[in-house]
Image: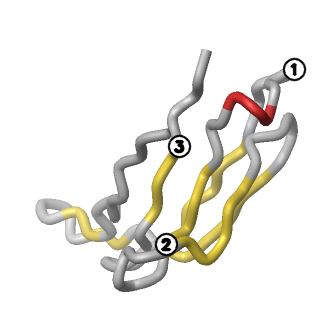
Amino acid sequence: MASLIHADFNRHSFMKLDKRIYLLVYLNENLDPSNGGNFELQDKEMKSYKMKILPLFNRLALFNTTDFSYQAHLRLVM
């Protein structure tokens, strides 16, 4: 499965506001975990994941947002 490792912006350049946290809530019912779609939090070097989160219904993921909050979503296989 392919994934794109990235860090989202954490500072709005025009408004000078900081984004401090991410909150993800999975609302997808009846997803088969064997199809992928996992959310990964990567290490600072982007060499391996530190945590893999299965996208199960009503699951919540909360984490700090920094310029090195590397993350990836593994693509769903349908």
Mark 2 or 3 closer to N-term?
2
Callout 3: helix, strand or loop? loop
Residue beneath label 1, please?
30
Figure quadrant of the C terminus:
top right
Mark 3 or 1 closer to N-term?
1
Q: Nearer the viewer, mark 3 or mark 1?
A: 3
The answer to whether 37 appears left or right of 26 in the picture is left
- Determine whether 62 is above or below 50 in the image: above
For label 1, the crowd category at 10 Å Cα-Cα, with few meaning under 14, some 14 to 19 and many 20 or more, is few
Amino acid type, mark 2: Gln
Outermost residue toward the bottom in this view: 44
For label 2, the crowd category at 10 Å Cα-Cα, with few meaning under 14, some 14 to 19 and many 20 or more, is many
- Determine whether 40 is above or below 18 in the image: above
Q: Are marks 2 and 3 in contact (CB under 8 Å)?
A: no
Callout count: 3
* Residue at (66, 70) in percent of width and height: 51
Residue beneath label 2, please?
42
Q: Nearer the viewer, residue 29 or 2?
A: 2
Q: Quadrant of residue 17?
A: bottom left
- Determine whether 2 is above or below 64 in the image: above
Mark 1 or 2 closer to N-term?
1
Q: CA distance from mark 3 to mark 1?
A: 18 Å
Q: Position of residue 9 (x, y in %)?
A: 28, 63
Amino acid type, mark 1: Asn
Q: Nearer the viewer, residue 20 or 27?
A: 27
Q: CA distance from mark 2 to mark 3?
A: 12 Å
* Residue at (33, 59) in percent of width and height: 6
* Residue at (37, 75) in percent of width and height: 46
Amino acid type, mark 3: Leu
Residue beneath label 3, please?
74
Rendered image: mark on residue 49:
none
